[in-house]
């Protein structure tokens, strides 16, 4: 049977002076006293530290090697202690991926809601996605240019960690010969070893075709086989001769990239390059207007921490640290060759000039004009490149003109490469002077890829809901209208979302948005958000230790916070609060007053009991103020204020 009390014997942590105390379980307990008297030493450095240490010791030796060991606090004995959770006055962290929604757990429920009850729309035309037949998929593939060499792939693994040894063996036993693993086509007999801690993509090669009217029957059979293996999804990869050629060529390519595949090439860059050449067609989700197919939405699709759902341009951050044209070109009256781009530092040599002149001929502008005289199209071409356009460059020499073709990535791409390759800190700091954080142009700060942004519930995408304030989001979900089927599917999820949003409203955080990043929160906001997550978790029999949760909270909302603490207590938990607030003391079941002074003059329990016991104690400074024996008097005389006197300062120029 659990002990009805938490018994502390001989606590000497920090400035505690052999404190012996009994605290009732499943009660709201307030530790108070002057600053530095030892209340935090008892709450966090003794109770919480011992609770954490015992919990870790209860785990297996394998688990403890990852968590480490905690030192035992300086105390003789603690009995009746429950697993402890500390909610301290500190930031939730500096990870820009943590938001109000993820810390409180609301975002996890929203991911499930949008995956199960969301309506998929086409990212291009906005039309509602409908099912696509195998005949329409075949017709879509036959619209590719004649002579195109394609691979029909069936996706079996999407962004999942593991070595996938059993899966590859099963594919070999089923008679499949090749697969595309992390972007590289290889024989299954010579598949590279995959990293168990890396995310991988595995797609089975169903067939290799050259698009022609005569391959319709073969294409139909291959598409049906791909839909069966790929769970209703087929990927059409347009490849060159090296990737779709003979088996020997394919083996050479896989062997040369074996080390890369073994490290788990699931990077955003490789995914982006594959996405530009792949056509995803699905028998479940496809746009009737554009003919684009999509995989079935899953909760992972709406995670900006997963390669499956994140925006590939900003890697799910929502912003990019990139070169700013305004910082690169402070004087736009200079011509490009001056150079007007400051990090170029010197006038480009002959080789670089013939590249820039080729770009000028291709786009059609005079590169010798001042920068502010160039058209916007010319500026974008020089800074950001010309995309996939093939440009013919002319190198003039004594023997004539040598022409060669290539793509032009732009000056900013060259500066990015130099910045990434720089190993010296002062070089990186030099380039960072010309960079700024800006909202990602691809996702507009939504952090998600186009497919995830096109799923809507109640007419709003997930990003639009997260950009609402907590109060407006609470009102939105309370008035959300769903079809009978959607209502059944989303019932439990909506219940959790509404409960967590209601708590945030009750503790005065209704002005925050769910996409607000954790590093921008104050200490009080951070603590109450973590408290919301704990109440939503529904744990029972836990010791919660809080550090002044009323800091930064308007007195109007203090009663709502206390109601939440009482709710946490009534669920069957012990709540220990380090607090100076009078209203909190009056609501507490027990008060422990530390003192009589700070530092070496403190560390003793001056009084303990109900608020009446504290008020009657002659030694308790807190009790003297609670009883009215002492008070902070209002000054009888105040300094006169001359409203006509204006502070001296610099006069503003007209």
Image: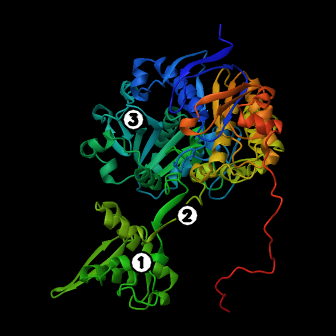
Q: Find disc 3 in the rendering and name its residue.
A: 197
Of callouts 2 and 1, the N-terminal one: 1
- Residue under the point 45% across and 90% down: 333
Q: Residue 513, percent across and down?
A: 69, 51
The Cα atoms of the two marked residues, 2 and 1, are separated by: 19 Å
Q: Work out whether residue 627 or residue 306 is closer to the camera in this orientation and state it.
A: 627
Q: Work out whether residue 61 or residue 202 is closer to the camera in this orientation and state it.
A: 61
* Label 3 residue SS: loop
Contact check, label 3 and label 2, Cβ < 8 Å: no
423 left or right of 334? Answer: left
Q: Nearer the viewer, mark 3 or mark 1?
A: 3
Q: Residue 199, percent across and down?
A: 43, 39
Of callouts 3 and 2, the N-terminal one: 3
Query: Residue 87 occupies which quadrant of the picture?
Result: top right
- Residue under the point 36% across and 41% down: 264
The Cα atoms of the two marked residues, 3 and 2, are separated by: 31 Å
- Residue under the point 56% across and 32% down: 41
Query: Residue 404 occupies which quadrant of the picture?
Result: bottom left
- How many C-alpha atoms fall within 10 Å of the one at disc 1: few (<14), some, or many (≥20)? many
Of callouts 3 and 1, the N-terminal one: 3
Q: Find disc 1 in the rendering and name its residue.
A: 382
- How many C-alpha atoms fall within 10 Å of the one at disc 3: few (<14), some, or many (≥20)? few
Kindly identify which numbered label has been placed on residue 101. Answer: none
Q: Say above or below: 61 vs 509.
A: above
Q: Residue 401, percent across and down?
A: 22, 84
326 left or right of 108? Answer: left
Q: Find disc 2 in the rendering and name its residue.
A: 441
Q: Say above or below: 287 vs 70.
A: below
* Label 1 residue SS: helix
């Amino acid at each position: 049977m659990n002990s009805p009390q938490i018994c502390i014997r001989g606590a000497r942590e920090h400035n505690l002076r052999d404190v012996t105390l009994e605290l009732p379980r499943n009660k709201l307990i307030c530790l108070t006293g002057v600053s530095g008297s030892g209340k935090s030493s008892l709450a966090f450095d003794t109770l919480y530290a011992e609770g954490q240490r015992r919990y870790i010791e209860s785990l297996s030796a394998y688990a403890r090697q990852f968590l480490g060991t905690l030192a035992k606090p300086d105390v003789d004995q603690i009995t009746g202690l429950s697993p402890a959770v500390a909610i301290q006055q500190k930031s939730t962290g500096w990870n820009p991926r943590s938001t109000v929604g993820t810390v409180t757990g609301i975002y996890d429920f929203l991911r499930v809601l949008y995956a199960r009850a969301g309506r998929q729309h086409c990212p291009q035309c906005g039309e509602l996605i409908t099912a696509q037949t195998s005949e329409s998929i075949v017709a879509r593939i036959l619209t590719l240019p004649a002579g195109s060499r394609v691979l029909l792939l069936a996706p079996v693994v999407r962004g999942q960690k593991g070595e996938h040894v059993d899966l590859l063996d099963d594919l070999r036993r089923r008679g499949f010969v090749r697969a595309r693993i992390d972007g590289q086509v290889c024989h299954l007999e010579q598949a590279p070893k995959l990293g168990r801690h890396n995310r991988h993509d595995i797609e089975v090669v169903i067939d290799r075709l050259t698009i022609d009217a005569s391959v319709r029957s073969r294409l139909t059979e291959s598409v049906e086989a791909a839909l069966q293996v790929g769970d209703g999804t087929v990927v059409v990869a347009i490849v060159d001769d090296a990737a779709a050629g003979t088996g020997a060529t394919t083996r050479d390519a896989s062997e040369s990239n074996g080390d890369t595949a073994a490290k788990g090439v699931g990077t955003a860059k490789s995914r982006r390059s594959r996405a530009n050449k792949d056509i995803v067609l699905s028998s479940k989700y496809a746009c009737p207007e554009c003919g684009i197919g999509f995989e079935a939405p899953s909760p992972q699709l709406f995670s900006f921490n997963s390669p499956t759902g994140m925006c590939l341009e900003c890697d799910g951050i929502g912003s990019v640290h990139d070169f700013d044209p305004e910082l690169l070109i402070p004087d736009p009256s200079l011509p490009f060759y001056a150079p007007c781009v400051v990090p170029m530092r010197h006038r480009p040599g002959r080789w670089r000039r013939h590249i820039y002149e080729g770009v000028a001929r291709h786009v059609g502008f005079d590169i010798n004009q001042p920068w502010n005289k160039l058209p916007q199209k010319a500026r974008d071409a020089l800074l950001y490149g010309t995309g996939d356009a093939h440009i013919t460059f002319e190198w003039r020499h004594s023997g004539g003109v040598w022409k060669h073709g290539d793509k032009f990535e732009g000056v900013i791409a060259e500066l990015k490469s130099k910045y990434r390759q720089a190993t010296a800190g002062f070089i990186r700091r030099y380039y960072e002077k010309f960079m700024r954080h800006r909202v990602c142009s691809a996702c507009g700060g939504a952090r998600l890829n186009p497919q995830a942004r096109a799923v809507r519930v109640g007419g709003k995408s997930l990003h639009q809901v997260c950009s609402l304030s907590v109060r407006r989001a609470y009102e939105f979900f309370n008035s959300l209208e769903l079809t009978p089927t959607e209502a059944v599917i989303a019932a439990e999820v909506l219940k959790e979302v509404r409960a967590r949003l209601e708590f945030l409203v009750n503790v005065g955080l209704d002005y925050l948005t769910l996409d607000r990043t954790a590093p921008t929160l104050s200490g009080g906001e951070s603590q109450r958000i973590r408290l919301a997550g704990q109440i939503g978790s529904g744990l029972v029999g836990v010791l919660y230790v809080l550090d002044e949760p009323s800091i930064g909270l308007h007195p109007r909302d203090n009663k709502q916070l206390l109601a939440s603490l009482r709710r946490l207590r009534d669920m069957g938990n012990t709540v220990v609060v380090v607090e100076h607030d009078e209203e909190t003391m009056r609501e507490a079941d027990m008060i422990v007053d530390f003192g009589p002074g700070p530092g070496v003059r403190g560390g003793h329990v001056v009084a303990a009991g109900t608020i009446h016991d504290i008020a009657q104690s002659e030694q308790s400074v807190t009790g003297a103020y609670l009883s009215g024996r002492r008070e902070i008097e209002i000054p009888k005389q105040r300094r006169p204020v001359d409203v006509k006197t204006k502070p001296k300062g610099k006069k503003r120029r007209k």
